[in-house]
Amino acid sequence: YCGICIEVCPFDALFWSPEFEYAETDIHELTHERDKLREWMWTVPEPPALDPGAEEPKEIAAARKTAEKLATQQAQEAQQAQQAQQAQQNEEGGTP
């Protein structure tokens, strides 16, 4: 409960909860499984809003760049297919 994991989490996946009754009498019960953590989810406050002037996270920027590259590639392929289809129609229409 030192909070270091929350401060350094690069994905903003961890947040403090106002809930403090996690005390256990056995040290082996201090590691909580998913079901136990799910019970506490309602105590976790909404994360703070992102700073509008902040730089976009590098993971999101990389994903966006890949998606844009794929969309451009698909658009080029569709345009080439359309041009090939028009060329084929022109050839068929030009010969009796």
Image (cartoon, grey):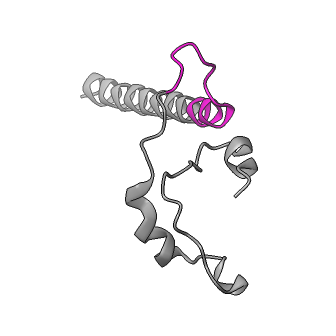
Name the residue at the top extreme: 53
Q: Residue at x 37, y 29 (%)?
A: 82
Determine which quarter of the picture holds residue 32: bottom right
The image quadrant that residue 59 belongs to is top right
- In screen coordinates, is 52 left or right of 39? right
Q: Position of residue 4 (x, y in %)?
A: 75, 48
In the rendering, at what x and y percent does residue 13 appear? 58, 49
The residue located at (69%, 46%) in the rendering is 9
Q: Residue at x 66, y 77 (%)?
A: 30
Quadrant where the C terminus lies? top left
Residue interval drawn in magenta: 50-66
Which x, y percent locates residue 10? 69, 42
Q: How many marks?
A: 0
Q: Quadrant of the N terminus?
A: bottom right
Residue 25 covered by magenta stretch: no
In the image, residue 19 sits, relative to residue 61, either above or below, namely below
Residue 59 against residue 15 in the figure, above or below? above
Can you give x and y, in whole percent of width and height, for residue 33 in the image? Answer: 57, 78
When asked about the image quadrant of residue 89, the answer is top left
Left or right position of 58 against 82: right
